[in-house]
Image: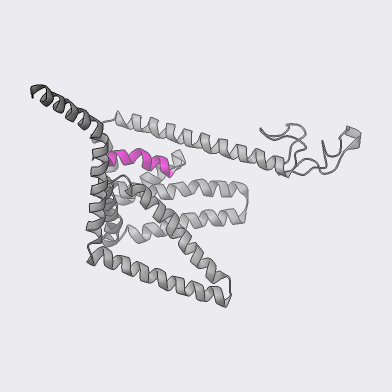
Amino acid sequence: HCASKCDKDAGEEVGVDCGRVGLITCDKNTGCPAFFQNGANLHDDSISGGVCLVLSLFLLIVCLMGLVNVLQRGLAGMSTRIIYKATNVNGLIGIVIGAAITILVQSSSITTSVLTPFVGIGVIQLEQMFPLTLGANIGTTITGLLAAMVSDNVDALQVALCHLFFNISGIVIWYPIPIMRRVPLRGARALGRATRRSRLVPPIYIIVVFFVIPLLLLGLSSLFMQKTVGFTVLGSFLVIGVILGIARFIWWWKKQEGLQKCLACLDRRTDMNSTMKTLPEDMQFLKSKVSLLAEHT
């Protein structure tokens, strides 16, 4: 915000140089940050903040894409044997390596985006990539911890620690026990096989897992937090309905050949798309054949 009190001796005018409250403070010596102006009100600063947010997100995405491209090109020039030896280590060491790489680049997305293509071409095995991904999830929490320590805010530090211990608890659940470790690996292989059949699988998976399910759980929990009998009863019926729906889906998936039906649907869509792509060439070929037959007859 600009100065709420006016200094008449300095020639400040009410409503122009002072007396108007915004979102940020403009220093008298260094001036205002970019896109902000002295004497702006709350609405002006909100617009400037929105512009800065959009530009920062755009630049962040561009920089991340550029960094991933550079790292992929750099690693692509290396020998596959070097990459295999560097990643063929004990699982705990792999977690440490993944965390260290992520701390250096300050983004788990960069680590996984760079290494995932090497899994696709068979240079890195899926069992080797798993601990590296877990380590990347640990390393990405360091950025939040550093920011929380700098901010000197207890709430920010609590959120950063929650992020850290949430990832650590996930590793403790899914990695040390071999039986539990096979669950995400089998799921990854199943998703990979489904993705080969249709490109619609990844967006459907992302929408369901990261949007539909969290919003459903958040909505159900909000009903019980209202502390009224009506919302509590409604939430109870919805929970029972969700449980019955999940049980019915599992029965259809396992006992009524739901998996085979989904795979058959994906195969039909893939065949239809490939047919539509080659349809113009096939039509030209058929026309040429028909014209040759017409000439001979």
Task: Kindly identify the residue that appears in the image at 43 percent across and 55 percent down.
Answer: 167
Establish if 131 lies above or below 17: below
Where is residue 184 drawn, in percent x and y?
31, 56
* Colour scheme in use: one colour
| Residue farthest toward the right in the current orientation of the protein | 9
Q: Of residues 108 and 292, which is closer to you in this image?
A: 292
Q: Tell me, yes or no, whether the highlighted magenta stretch contains residue 94.
A: no
Image quadrant holding the N terminus, namely top right
The quadrant in which residue 211 appears is bottom left
| Quarter containing the C terminus | top left
Residue 132 spot, x, y in % from top left: 34, 46
Looking at the image, which residue sits at the far top?
Answer: 295
Left or right position of 292 against 109:
left
> Can you give x and y, in whole percent of width and height, for residue 257 in the image?
22, 62
- Which range is magenta? 108-123
Residue 192, horizontal then vertical, whole percent: 27, 48
Left or right relative to 239: residue 26: right
Residue at image x 23%, y 67%? Answer: 255
Q: Residue at position x 36%, y 61% from top? A: 173
Residue 143 position (above or below residue 30): below
Q: Residue reaching furthest left?
A: 296
How many labels sit on residues?
A: 0
Residue 239: quarter of image: bottom left
Kindly tell me whether residue 125 is visible in this rendering: no
Q: Main secondary structure of the magenta part?
A: helix
Judging depth in this view, the residue of 3 and 149 nearest the camera is 3
Observer able to see residue 222: yes
Residue at the image position 56 percent from the left and 35 percent from the top: 55
